[in-house]
Amino acid sequence: MTRAMRIVALLCGSLSAWADEPPAGLLRRVLERETVTEEQRANYAYRQKVHIEELEPGGRKRGEYREARDVIFSPEGKRFEQLVGKPFRSLDRLVLTEEDFRDIREVQPFLFTRDSLPMYQTKYKGEDTTAGFRCWLLQVSPRQILDGQRLFEGLIWVHQQDLAVIRMEGRAVPQMLGKKENLFPRFVTVRKLVDGKFWFPEKTSADDVLQFRSGALRMKMAIDYETYKRFGAESTVTFDLK
């Protein structure tokens, strides 16, 4: 395609030719960046606040769940979680299950690392802008779901400058539709730049109507990841962005 043809295509509102295919090596570089991000996040303490609301279709709140926990380190350097006070529970119909709490720990702050690649397939979806940043958009879905697995299904936004994932939108799967009916909301997780180097989860939000057999139930969720603080000595980090 000539330069003139590209200009015509842009004026017509179509995607540019170079946006139809992903940049060479994009997936490999994203996996590398995410793997380093996971390794570095394991060296940070932070506070995680969870607020879940159960609402009637008209919007009136029927109940809620709130908890805060610190991810901290012992003097010996062992990382662990510690509840801050007691969780507040006043939910009516909504029952929080083991899968819900696994999703809060593993799926809502999902990191697409090298180790997770065998479980997923990806499809390039073009370019987009989020929070003022130009991004490449990837669709991520499980290849298969084995018994007991909790996986992510949705879209991820990859910052074009440093190849970091800065936003994800989707849901935890599988939905459970048998005798043990257990449904999960669509959510958005956004990340923020920490210490000028790493994009860590900042906030997860959801507002979805779950279609249970016993009737629809609206669920709102907010998870905040606050006060990231590095534990231990500083280290030099490099990313393979070539």
Image (cartoon, rainbow, N blue to C red):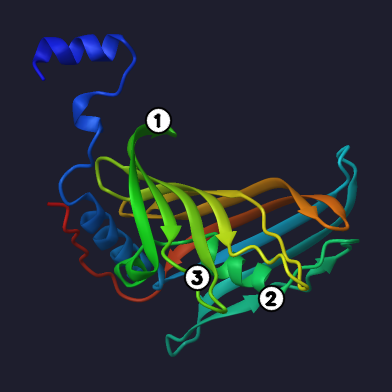
Q: Is residue 115 above or below residue 8?
A: below
Quadrant of residue 42 within the rendered picture: bottom left
Q: Amino acid at mark 1?
A: Gly
Q: Is residue 187 above or below residue 180?
A: above
Q: What whole-number distance in Å separates the C-alpha atoms at marks 2 and 1?
A: 37 Å
Q: Dot 3 surroundings within 10 Å: few (below 14), some, or many (20 or more)?
A: few
Q: Is residue 131 left or right of residue 214?
A: left
Q: Dot 2 surroundings within 10 Å: few (below 14), some, or many (20 or more)?
A: few
The residue lying furthest to the front in this view is: 178
Residue at label 3? Answer: 145
Q: Secondary structure at mark 3?
A: loop
Q: Amino acid at mark 2?
A: Glu
Q: Closer to the observer: label 3 or label 2?
A: 3
The residue lying furthest to the bottom in this view is: 76
Q: Is residue 205 left or right of residue 191?
A: right
Q: Is residue 17 left or right of residue 109?
A: left
Q: Closer to the observer: label 2 or label 1?
A: 2
Q: Dot 1 surroundings within 10 Å: few (below 14), some, or many (20 or more)?
A: few
Dot 3 or dot 2: first in sequence order is 2
Dot 2 or dot 1: first in sequence order is 2
Q: Which mark is residue 144?
A: none
Q: What whole-number distance in Å separates the C-alpha atoms at marks 3 and 1?
A: 35 Å
Q: What whole-number distance in Å separates the C-alpha atoms at marks 3 and 2?
A: 17 Å
CB-based contact (under 8 Å), mark 3 and mark 1? no
Dot 3 or dot 1: first in sequence order is 1
Of 225 and 180, the residue lying toward us: 180
Quarter occupied by the N terminus: top left
Q: Closer to the observer: label 3 or label 1?
A: 3
Q: Which mark is residue 132?
A: 1
Residue at label 2? Answer: 98
Q: Amino acid at mark 3?
A: Ile
CB-based contact (under 8 Å), mark 3 and mark 2? no
